[in-house]
Image (cartoon, helix red, strand yellow):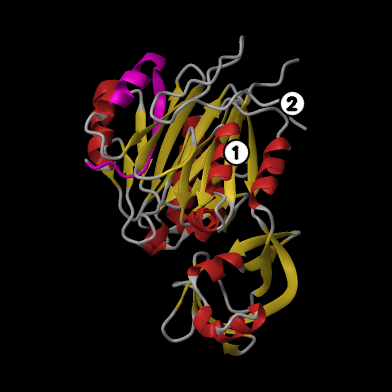
Amino acid sequence: MSSALPEPWPGDVAPVRPKPTVGFPRAPLALAVPAGAEDMAARLIAAFQPIGPCLVLLFGTPVSGLPQLGRELGAALGPACRIVGCSSAGEIGPQGYCKESVVALAFPAESFRAGICILRDQAQVPVSDWMAKLRRFHAGFRPDPRRSSFGILLPDALARQEDVLVATLDAAIPGLPVIGGSAAEGMRFLPTCQMVDGEAHPGAAVFMLIETDLAVAEVSFAHFRPTDRRAVVTAADPHNRIIWELNAEPAAQEYARLTGIALNALTTTEFARHPLLLRTGRRHHVRAIRAMTPDGGLQLLSGIEAGNILTLGHAVDMTQGFADAMDALPRPPLMVLGFDCILRRIALERAGMTERMSELLARYRVVGFNTYGEQHSGMHVNQTFVGMALMPPEVG
């Protein structure tokens, strides 16, 4: 169990500097700025220049656009600093959930090293090309075995290839802990944006390999448990992630029967409360339902295939379970890079629990964004929080 946590971070419109721990490497610096701020670039440059970052991550959509902001930061911070960003469905700043903001993280070069690999043409699914490119990238990066390493994946959610991407990554660089969040654009499911060094890369996935003197630990939490109600996918469209039939019945009709909810009462809220779970090994992973199609199918946010056996899930306490997952870390985190499904945030808002969850996110120093899907442990999932905790290195 963790010892007492550090004090919560201060306000989310000023630089967040975790209290330094004598003798330990420097943690990333976090800052959240309103998306409409005309002086956004100036604020970020003033905060980040003194720490000499090797990487800056940007989550959200500034009024000027991510590419423009990336170019401005790159010009000021120099060629040794890479700038990567993506649009989001909401942000997690130093005070917890925030909206219409841009959250920025600067990784100081004295404690971190970063490499970037852009995986293009998700629509074409060039797995062999991705595999070869990732292996060359990893070999060229030459990770130092004396330091911690982890990966960050920012895929375009609308390309719907996250399942293939994470499996490819897991095979190309085995043993590397990788977390990811699918780029989003509010709840409108409009085209998303991924940016690297001031250039937009529509339809691509951005993979980052991070090396650090800090200790790292992956953390995940899904607030659902399986029930005894199951269904077999008897007809599906895997490419478009649609279930046409469950138990040889129209999918939405059978789902309504399993949940006990009238077909005409199925809404985003009900889908979020009663997700479908796919068991892999000993764990159940959420296969969230995005919407009911006009012809009675179920549109998912994760991959699905005929023959999959799904279990209906039921919700448990979102806040206590999250705190328990964080308290299970070996040491209190200096920062947690977190990707949190937008459906979890919606459920919290409708339950009146947003403030409580924001307090916990701030307490455990979580910074990141709300996604259309999450990646961890070689899986693409939904309605899950995934994070990479950065902690002081173990002494002795």
Please tell me whether residue 9 is drawn above or below residue 372 in the rendered image: above
**Closer to us: 365 or 149:** 365
- For disc 1, the neighbor class at 10 Å (few under 14, some 14 to 19, many from 20) is many
Residue extending farthest to the top is: 22
Please tell me whether residue 273 is drawn above or below residue 249 in the rendered image: above
**Which circle's residue, 1 or 2, is located before the other in the chain?**
2
Left/right placement of residue 203 relative to residue 207 reads left
Q: Quadrant of the C terminus?
A: top right
What amino acid type is highlighted by mark number 2? Ser
x and y, in percent, of residue 247 in the image: 64, 86
Q: Residue at x 44, y 72 (%)?
A: 240
Helix, strand or loop at label 2? It is: loop
Residue extending farthest to the bottom is: 249
Region rendered in magenta? 43-63
Marking on residue 66: none
Compute the Cα span from label 1 to label 2: 16 Å
Helix, strand or loop at label 1? It is: helix
What amino acid type is highlighted by mark number 1? Leu
- Asked which quadrant contains residue 60, the reply is top left
Please tell me whether residue 392 is drawn above or below residue 316 in the rendered image: above
> Residue 77, can we see it?
yes
**Residue behind mark 2:** 3
Q: Residue at x 67, y 67 (%)?
A: 313
Q: Residue at x 52, y 67 (%)?
A: 269
**Residue behind mark 1:** 360
Q: Is residue 53 one of those drawn in magenta?
A: yes
Q: How many marks?
A: 2
